[in-house]
Image (cartoon, grey):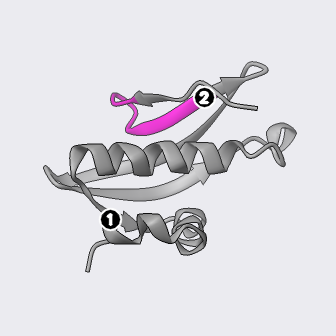
Amino acid sequence: MTYEIRNNEEESRFETTVEGQVAFAAYDLEDPDRIVFTHTIVPEALSGRGIANQLVKHGLEHAREKKLTVVPQCSFVATYVQRHPEYGELLAK
C-alpha cells in the first residue's frame, strides 16, 4: 500500500495519517544544505505495514531533490540507507 506523505515544515517532519493516527520521520535543518533525521515514529497499531520505510524514502527523495546533505541521527534512517545504497551519496562525509 502507498501512503500519502507530506512535508509538514511547521513541525519539521514528513508525516502521514493512517486510521486517524500520525506516523512521522522528524528532521532538523541545521543549515540551508543539511538535513538531520532525528527520529521516526509509527504508532504500534500501524507497525508492520511499511509506513516507516515510505516516510524515510520520501524524506531522502526530498533531500536529493533539494540537494541536501543527510545526517541519519535516527537509527532507522541509518539502517534504511545501509539497505538502500542508492542513497549513500546523500550522507554527510
Give the quarter of the figure containing the N terminus: top right
Circle 1 SS class: helix
Which residue, as the protein is rendered here, is positioned at the far top?
A: 20
Q: Which residue is mark 2?
A: 16
Q: Is residue 63 above or below residue 22?
A: below
Identify the residue at horizontal 40%, vertical 33% (top origin).
11
Q: Position of residue 18 (x, y in %)?
A: 73, 24
Q: Position of residue 64 (x, y in %)?
A: 31, 51
Disc 1/disc 2 C-alpha distance (Å): 23 Å
Q: Which residue is mark 1?
A: 90
Q: Is residue 62 above or below residue 91?
A: above
Of the numbered discs 1 and 2, the one sitting upstream in the chain is 2
Identify the residue at horizontal 65%, vertical 48% (top origin).
52
Span shown in magenta: 8-16
Density class for disc 2 (Cα within 10 Å; few <14, some 14-19, many ≥20) is many
Which residue, as the protein is rendered here, is positioned at the far bottom?
A: 93
Q: Is residue 17 left or right of residue 38?
A: right
Circle 2 SS class: strand
Image mark count: 2
Which residue, as the protein is rendered here, is positioned at the far front?
A: 86
In this view, the mark in front (1 or 2):
1
Q: Are marks 1 and 2 in contact (CB under 8 Å)?
A: no
Q: Looking at numbered disc 1 in the image, what kind of residue is underneath it?
A: Leu
Q: Looking at numbered disc 2 in the image, what kind of residue is underneath it?
A: Thr
Q: Position of residue 8 (x, y in %)?
A: 41, 28
Res 37 visible: yes
Give the quarter of the figure containing the C terminus: bottom left
Identify the residue at horizontal 41%, vertical 71% (top origin).
88
Q: In the depicted view, which residue is nearer to us: 15 or 43? A: 15
